[in-house]
Amino acid sequence: MVAAMPRVAAPAALAGLNARYRVRLWGGAQFGATVADGKVTTVAGPVDSADCTILTEPVAFLLMALGRIDPVPVMATGRALAWGRKPWLGPRFPRLFVAP
């Protein structure tokens, strides 16, 4: 997932966005994604000073990433949480990518 994300980024959704995300999957795996200048860069493992931290169950994350479910109901039911300096970026994260 980390290697594929830069390749499936949606240029229109990235326009004008500068943000750092920390994504943690229930069970321990985590990675970081930085959006800047219309590009996404990712790093495996923990990241510091994220604008938005997302904690989600792995199945919900995969379904959101594939565009099968909307992130807002997932967050409303507690299967994904977002916090940090800019928690409103959480629901936007899955929409930054297009399903292959």
Image: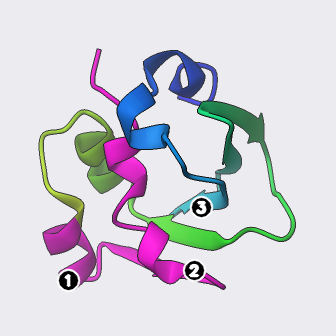
Determine which residue is flagged by label 3.
24
Q: At 60% across and 71% down in the image, what residue appears?
A: 53
Cβ atoms at labels 2 and 3 below 8 Å apart:
no
Residue 79 among magenta residues? yes
* Residue highlighted by disc 2: 86
The part of the chain drawn in magenta is 72-100
Asked if the residue under mark 3 is in contact with the one under mark 1, i.e. CB atoms within 8 Å, the reply is no
Q: CA distance from mark 1 to mark 2?
A: 17 Å
Earlier sequence position, callout 1 versus callout 3: 3
| Residue 60, horizontal then vertical, whole percent | 28, 54
Residue drawn at the location 49% of the way across and 40% of the way down: 15
Pick out the residue farthest to the front: 16
Report which quarter residue 68 is drawn in.
Answer: top left
Describe the element under mark 3 as helix, strand or loop.
strand
Question: Type of residue at label 3?
Answer: Arg
Circle 2 — which element? loop
Image spot of residue 71 (x, y percent): 24, 62
